[in-house]
Image: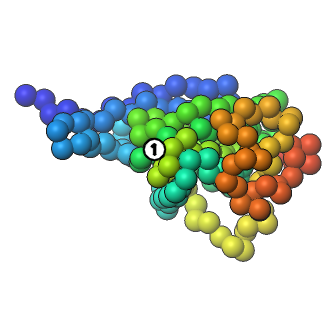
Amino acid sequence: MAVPTTEFKAYPTGIPGLLVFDVTSIGDDRGWFQEKFHKEKLEAAGLPSGFQVVQTNVSYNKEKGVARGMHAEPWGKYISVISGRAFVAYVDLRKGPTFGQVETLKIDNNKAVFVPQGIANSYQTLESDTYYIYSVTAHWSQELYDKYVSLNMNDPALKIRWPIAIENAIVSERDRNHPFLKDIKPMDVK
């Protein structure tokens, strides 16, 4: 008898390289089990083989309506939710014809997203007690912080329809004051 296991199925988006994964979980009377990251299975589904995790972070969000981002660091990310739900938004900040292109969706514990370098990402919680987890290919660095690119999540040019208007959301002052797309220099990503 075969033992049930987590399966990953990838879907491309309108932003080249940005992938959404359906991720199954195995449940019973006790709850559920899920492989959040399984390199071999993810690569078979479409994750780039060069994606090497060096750090995994968890962001706990106490309230519904917490919004974080929009950040494009010089590394790739694999994002998921452990508990709760989030509306996620991505903007291509790479030099080229898709600069400024936006993609949005909702994720929960059965969705994951691969975000390539040069794509700004942000999210807004749709439930209280949302745990957002992301694995990255490089360590965050205070010394390099000024080289990271941040974008104002409330930029009208992006036309993002946040479930809770950003002016009514729980957002850090720093995230509220990031520059608009028109003021961003496209990232030169190799």
147 or 48: nearer the eye? Answer: 147
Outermost right residue: 183
Residue occupying the point 73% across, 47% down: 168
Residue occupying the point 31% across, 42% down: 34
Judge left or right: residue 95 versus residue 23.
right
Mark yes or no: residue 23 visible.
yes
Residue 97 lies, with reference to residue 78, above or below; the image says: above
Residue position marked by numbered label 1 in the rendering: 84
Give the image's coloring scheme: rainbow
Label 1 amino acid? Answer: Gly
Residue 155 lies, in percent from the top left, at 84, 42
Image-quadrant location for residue 153: top right
Judge left or right: residue 138 versus residue 6.
right
Residue 119 lies, with reference to residue 68, above or below; the image says: above
Mark yes or no: residue 148 visible.
no
Residue 107 lies, in percent from the top left, at 51, 36
Residue occupying the point 86% across, 52% down: 179
At label 1, counting other C-alpha atoms closer than 10 Å, the crowd grade (few under 14, some 14-19, many 20 or more) is: some
